[in-house]
Image (cartoon, grey):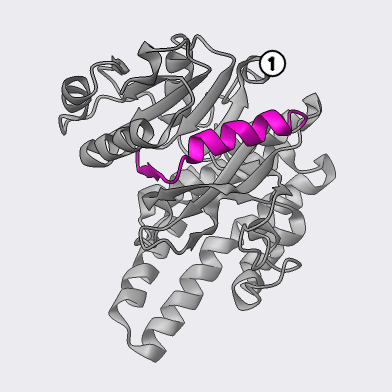
């Protein structure tokens, strides 16, 4: 049943898709199956060539479909979708997700019980229903960057001191204030989005929600997550490191240092962070030779490519 046909929508759900036809269809189906809160669904397809837009139009005619002729990137696409929003609440939901057990209803109720937070998120799981910790993060700091370069965050993965960006081994099973809520499942008020200007278009891919959540502090927001709203997020599952992806990610992270580290730490933060790909190259190269594992050798070659391309990411977004 289309929830928007029987009641004025309370919530606008935005899904930005690109080359994820079946996942997008499964995601949308789970929204309709698991959501009682009256909503409007806005799907923007970033010029997919896999038939995503046509499939959405055919299977979900009540969704507001925006089929673009060019790929705008994740962040900029949201600004286009926002022109179609008619409610006071906005849920950002990735197309590679599945809504579980009325998660959207639960998150919406949680937000109304904690209006001071300004930004709200839930708990994400992998396909096998194991914890996917990428639903929220702690901010990058000079210390977390040093820990990353030295590998301390991996050696002492369970420690919040050494692995602060992932909160150590916290299983996301309690309500907690966090620095960053993942954009894969992020609820925000339209008034707050507008006050922030939403995502900064400089971040085409990666870093959008981090930048926005950190900027939201100036408005008095205190992002918070609840374990009662759970979704599956396939994107957080293990995947091979790819050089192009890592270049984009590293560029975004350096830009976050440029914008959000204390001014006196920025030069040092950039210098330290630039060593991370080199440290991964050395570690995977040595491990690959000692352990004779083909996948480590392949990962090492990828990190070598990322290091060769350091001029593309080492200064952030140009």
Q: Which residues are magenta?
A: 95-116
Which residue is at 60% across, 56% downward?
Answer: 274
Which residue is at 50% across, 35% downward?
Answer: 104
Which residue is at 66% across, 15% downward?
Answer: 191
Q: Position of residue 258 (x, y in %)?
A: 69, 39
Q: Position of residue 311 (x, y in %)?
A: 49, 46
Q: Is residue 21 depicted above or below 63 in this figure?
A: below
Which residue is at 43% across, 14% downward?
Answer: 80
Horizontally, residue 72 falls left or right of residue 56, namely right
Q: Quadrant of residue 118?
A: top right
Residue 48 visible in the picture = yes
Residue 317 visible in the picture = no
As drawn, which residue projects farthest toward the front? 6
As drawn, which residue projects farthest toward the bottom? 290
Look at the image and say whether residue 265 sits in the magenta stretch: no
* Secondary structure type for disc 1: helix
Look at the image and say whether residue 115 sits in the magenta stretch: yes
Q: Position of residue 296 (x, y in %)?
A: 36, 76
Name the residue tied to disc 1.
Answer: 195
Horizontally, residue 7 falls left or right of residue 48, namely right
The N terminus, quarter of image? top left
Horizontally, residue 62 falls left or right of residue 214, namely left
The C terminus, quarter of image? top right
Q: Is residue 246 depicted above or below 213 in this figure?
A: below
Number of labelled discs? 1
User: How many other residues sit within 10 Å of disc 1, few (<14), some (14-19) or many (≥20)?
Assistant: few
């Amino acid at each position: 049943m289309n929830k928007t046909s029987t009641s004025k929508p309370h919530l606008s759900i935005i899904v930005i898709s690109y080359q994820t036809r079946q996942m997008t269809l499964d995601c949308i189906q789970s929204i309709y199956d698991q959501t009682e809160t009256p909503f409007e669904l806005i799907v923007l397809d970033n010029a997919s060539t896999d038939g995503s837009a046509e499939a959405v139009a055919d299977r979900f005619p009540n969704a507001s479909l925006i089929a673009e002729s060019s790929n705008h990137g994740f962040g900029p696409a949201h600004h286009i979708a926002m022109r179609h929003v008619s409610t006071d609440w906005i849920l950002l939901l990735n197309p590679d997700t599945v809504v579980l057990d009325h998660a959207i209803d639960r998150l919406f109720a949680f937000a109304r019980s904690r209006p001071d937070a300004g930004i709200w998120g839930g708990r994400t799981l992998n396909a096998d229903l194991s914890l996917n910790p990428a639903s929220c993060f702690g901010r990058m700091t000079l210390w977390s960057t040093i820990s990353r370069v030295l590998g301390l965050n991996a050696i002492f993965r369970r420690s919040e001191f050494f692995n602060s960006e992932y909160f150590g081994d916290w299983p996301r099973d309690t309500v907690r204030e966090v620095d960053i809520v993942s954009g894969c499942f992020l609820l925000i008020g339209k008034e707050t989005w507008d006050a922030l200007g939403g995502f900064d278009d400089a971040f085409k891919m990666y870093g959008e929600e981090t930048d926005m959540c950190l900027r939201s502090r100036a408005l008095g927001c205190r992002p918070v997550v609840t374990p009662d709203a759970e979704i599956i997020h396939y994107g957080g599952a293990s995947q091979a490191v790819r050089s192009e992806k890592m270049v984009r990610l590293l560029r975004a992270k350096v830009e976050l240092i440029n914008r959000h580290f204390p001014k006196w730490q920025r030069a040092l933060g950039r210098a330290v962070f630039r060593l991370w790909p080199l440290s991964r190259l050395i570690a995977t190269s040595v491990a690959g030779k000692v352990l004779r594992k083909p996948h480590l050798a392949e990962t090492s070659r990828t990190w070598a490519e990322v290091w060769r391309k350091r001029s593309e990411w080492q200064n952030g977004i140009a």
